[in-house]
Image (tube, rainbow, N blue to C red):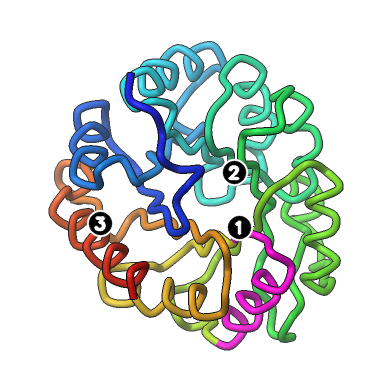
Amino acid sequence: MVQSRFYKDKLCLNVLAKDIDNAKEIYEVTEGHVLIGLLSTHYQTVDEAVQDIGEYQKELGGAISLGLGAGDPRQWKMVAEICRTLKLDHVNQVFSAVGYTRACLQNETTLVNGLVNPVDQLGNVNVATGPLTSTGTQMEIPLTTAISFIKEMGGNSVKLFPLDGLQTREQYKRIAHICAKEDFPLEPTGGIDLQNFEEIVTIALQAGVTKVIPHVYSSIIDKDTGRTRVEDVKKLYDIIKRVVVT
């Protein structure tokens, strides 16, 4: 079984796959420098998810990112319960459930992110992303405080969603600088495509972020087949190789 390169990568692509064959193609074209996103919303039960995701895990050396599905707070518990059985490389979670998820994993190695939303005030984020808090008003706090909370809960990175491409450019730049200062990974998500990908990852790398995990989902999925276009993944990987070297 191949071993995941995720933990050593400074810049690691996170993309979806329709099925195992699609995932294998993506893994091959990126030379293993990728996380395959599998969403809990695609499964009816935890047992079904564990069985199916386990098959991907065997084929891809663990390079799996377990997701909520568009940051859906209703999926937090299912994601956490899947983690009781599967010890994956990467897990997406709402801010308030990071600690619960780490306890379910019973390890210190899986990277668990904490979902926060960008807000107008530079340097602040909204941490009300859970099943109860997300239905009310925003809870804005400084990102430095949010990072401290994530660390205390056993989390490892900030997932910034929705980025809306570069519409939140100034907020994103400030967040990248704070993550760099705090030596904390950053995961920009939402509205990333072939046109803005290079600028988005370059902003983070030039700010000094030590690990960047851009999630590129719907923009590279063929609407007719549901498969992630391997040729688009290759274009993204070519950009990664270029910007990381420079």
Could you tell me which residue is drawn at 82 percent across and 72 percent down? 140
In front: 47, or 30?
30
Indicate the quadrant containing the N terminus: top left, top right, bottom left or bottom right. top left
Q: Are marks 2 and 1 in contact (CB under 8 Å)?
A: yes
Secondary structure type for disc 1:
strand
Q: Amino acid at mark 2?
A: Asn
* Mark 3 Cα shell of 10 Å, populated few (<14), some (14-19), many (≥20): many
Which residue carries the number 2 mark?
92
Q: Main secondary structure of the magenta part?
A: helix
Query: Is 124 displayed left or right of 163 in the figure?
Result: right
Q: Which is nearer the N-term, disc 1 or disc 3?
A: 1
State the residue at coordinates (44%, 34%): 64
Residue under pointer 3: 220
Magenta residues (range): 170-185
- The crowd level at tag 2 (other Cα within 10 Å; few <14, some 14-19, many 20+) is many
N-terminal-most mark, 2 or 3: 2
Residue farthest to the front, as pictured: 245
Q: Which residue is depicted at the point 48% across and 56% down?
A: 213
Instruction: Judge whether residue 39 is colored magenta.
Output: no
- Which quadrant does the C terminus fall into? bottom left
SS under mark 3:
helix
Distance between the alpha carbons at the discs numbered 2 and 1 = 8 Å
What mark, if any, has residue 159 been given in the picture? 1
Residue 173 on the magenta segment: yes
Residue type beneath disc 3: Ile
